[in-house]
Every structure is written in C-alpha cells, then in structure tokens.
Image (tube, rainbow, N blue to C red):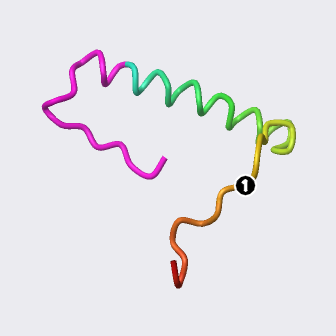
Amino acid sequence: MPSTVISYSHSDADIEETVEKIHETLVVYKKALMEGVDKYLEGRPVKPVWRKFN
C-alpha cells in the first residue's frame, strides 16, 4: 500500500471502510509472518516499484 491519501471528497463511511480493509489485510500479513509467507502467496511476486531504469 504505497499511500493512503484522504480528501474532502471521502465520506466518513469511505474512511471507515478503508480502515476496516487495512485491518483485515494486516491480520493476513501477521499470519503470513508467523506461519510462513509461502502459505499465503498467490501468483507471481511483484517487481519493485522503484527501479534504476523503468
């Protein structure tokens, strides 16, 4: 998650949903760290966003 920028166009419900989804995601990240990342990986690993030459 590169950034979480909020603005006046976001409602309280939008922000609450975002916080809820981040929480759900972090639960999975914690399980992956505790139980082994390979158990939770799906698909190809992503490439780094910042490369010397894109």
Numbered label tally: 1
Image location (x, y in percent) of residue 13: 29, 15
The residue drawn where x is 38% and y is 49% is 3
- The structure residue drawn at horizontal position 64% and vertical position 64%, both measured from the top left corner, is 47
Is residue 7 part of the magenta span, yes or no? yes
Which residue is at the far top? Answer: 13
> Is 10 above or below relative to 33?
above
Residue at 79% over, 37% down = 40
Residue 28 % position (x, y): 68, 31
> Magenta segment: does it hold 37?
no
Query: Is 4 on the left-hand or right-hand side of 23?
Result: left
Query: Which secondary structure, mark 1?
Result: loop
Residue ID for mark 1 = 45
Q: Can you say whether 33 is above or below 26 in the image? A: below
Q: Is residue 43 above or below residue 48?
A: above
Q: Nearer the viewer, residue 34 or 39?
A: 39
CA neighbours of label 1 inside 10 A, class few (<14), some (14 to 19), many (20+): few
Specify whether 16 is left or right of 36: left
Q: Quadrant of residue 4?
A: top left
Specify the farthest residue to the left.
Answer: 8
Q: Which residues are magenta?
A: 1-16
Residue 21: percent from the left, percent from the top? 49, 25
Amino acid type, mark 1: Pro
Q: Is residue 47 left or right of residue 9?
A: right
Above or below residue 49? Residue 7 is above
Tell me what residue is drawn at x 53 percent, y 27 percent.
23
**Residue 20: x percent and y percent?**
46, 21
Q: Which is the main secondary structure of the residues drawn in magenta?
A: loop
